[in-house]
Image (cartoon, rainbow, N blue to C red):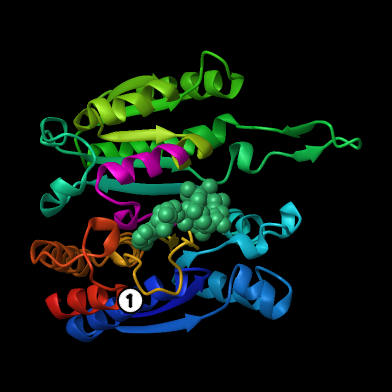
Amino acid sequence: MTKTIAVIAGDGIGPEIVGEAVKVLGKVAEKFGHDFTFNEKLVGGAAYDAFGDCLPDDTLAVCKSADAILLGAVGGPKWDALPGPQRPEKRALLTLRKELGLFANLRPAKVWPPLKGASPLKDEIIGEGLDLLVVRELTGGVYFGEHTRAADGQSALDKMPYSVAEIERIARVAFESARKRRRHVISVDKANVLETSRLWRETVQRLHDAEYPDVALEFMYVDNAAMQLVRAPSRFDVLLTENMFGDILSDEASQITGSIGMLPSASLRADGFGMYEPIHGSAPDIAGKGVANPLATILSAAMMLRHTFGLGEEADAVERAVGKVLESGVRTADLGGSASCAEIGAAVVAAL
Ligand code: NAD
Ligand code: IPM
Ligand code: MN
């Protein structure tokens, strides 16, 4: 199979972790006889420093014409003072998501057996297991509503719009995903306060009754969901959320698995095209030290193989290799070990 992958490493630990994931994809190509071309471009603060724009036209064009995108992370203190629309998070990340129509964000969180001890939860809670999928709406809600500051600077407003069509298409992804898993969707909202949440609930219920009666559906307020995740994580299968709730709950779920450095994601368009990135950020506190955990990015590359390229066997091979590395006991500092980012990448390549 011949594929072109846009590689946008970004800022902070981005280049370190993406470098290891590219090595893993290179090994997959060699082992399975594929031809992957990696087209590297600057994005985020790195692109701002070079060209005065966090998302240069050339980077966007390469991303649009690629078969898939591998992203590290963008942002950092150096660019925090830029005006909102020019910041790496908005100009690069949110623009890419919106421009490319990547409305469905899949964030699987599971406890890898060798990492049970790394979870902050007690043995009797984590012993029940954790294997959930956050299905997060990614191109709507408060992230893309109007953001304004009053002329006198004394008040501000962020709008949170949602339409029935936007809710239906993400709910469909959740129900379809649940059919391939344990057939249980928990839809998260704040319907006791927010009108968008009441529309969300009605829409999800209607779609369920009409097309997915075989999937169990529950509604949960977001505050309760945050609590239940640490009280009884094993009861979650698919968690359906709007944009901001999914952002928050997926970071929480990641730490239950031992580290945010373990959680991959896929941001998908209806036709299967996708951008793949770890759920964590640029980790400025450890950038440049070579100690970041590259596994979330490597597992994101595995999701690319599976979801966009349809290469399930190759994706399984990468995930098995990650499992072997964890079983061997080598791990980065976030998981209590002392291996470097490069050592973990090399170990995954060797296990492949
Ligand atoms: P963060 O996820 O970058 O870091 C939070 C904590 O987790 C830090 O202590 C960090 O060292 C640790 N961490 C994260 N990834 C790790 C890894 N792979 N290995 C080991 N430790 C890891 O979140 P933050 O500090 O809130 O944000 C830092 C910057 O990243 C901000 O500018 C933020 O806007 C940006 N950000 C970008 C993305 C993205 O590009 N997708 C996502 C989240 C945050
Ligand atoms: C994520 C990040 C982004 C988000 C930020 C950097 C805009 O936290 O991908 O989880 O909130 O979506
Ligand atoms: Mn986040």
Could you say where residue 166 lies in the image, as x and y percent from the top left? 54, 37
- Residue interval drawn in magenta: 248-271
Mark 1, Cα crowd under 10 Å, few <14 / some 14-19 / many 20+, is: many
Q: Amino acid at mark 1?
A: Glu
Query: Mark 1 sits on what residue?
Result: 20
Q: Quadrant of residue 236?
A: top left
* Residue 298 included in the magenta stretch of the image: no
In percent of the image, x 12 and y 33: which residue is there? 128
- The quarter of the picture where the C terminus appears is bottom left
Q: Is residue 101 visible?
A: no
In percent of the image, x 9 and y 62: which residue is there? 327
Element type where label 1 sits in the image: helix
In percent of the image, x 47 and y 42: which residue is there? 247
Q: Nearer the viewer, residue 220 or 272?
A: 220
**Residue, far right:** 151
Q: Please indicate whether residue 35 sits to the left or right of residue 53 in the image.
A: left
Q: Quadrant of residue 349?
A: bottom left
On screen, residue 149 above or below 281: above
Q: Please indicate whether residue 224 sits to the left or right of residue 200 in the image.
A: left
In percent of the image, x 48 and y 18: which residue is there? 202
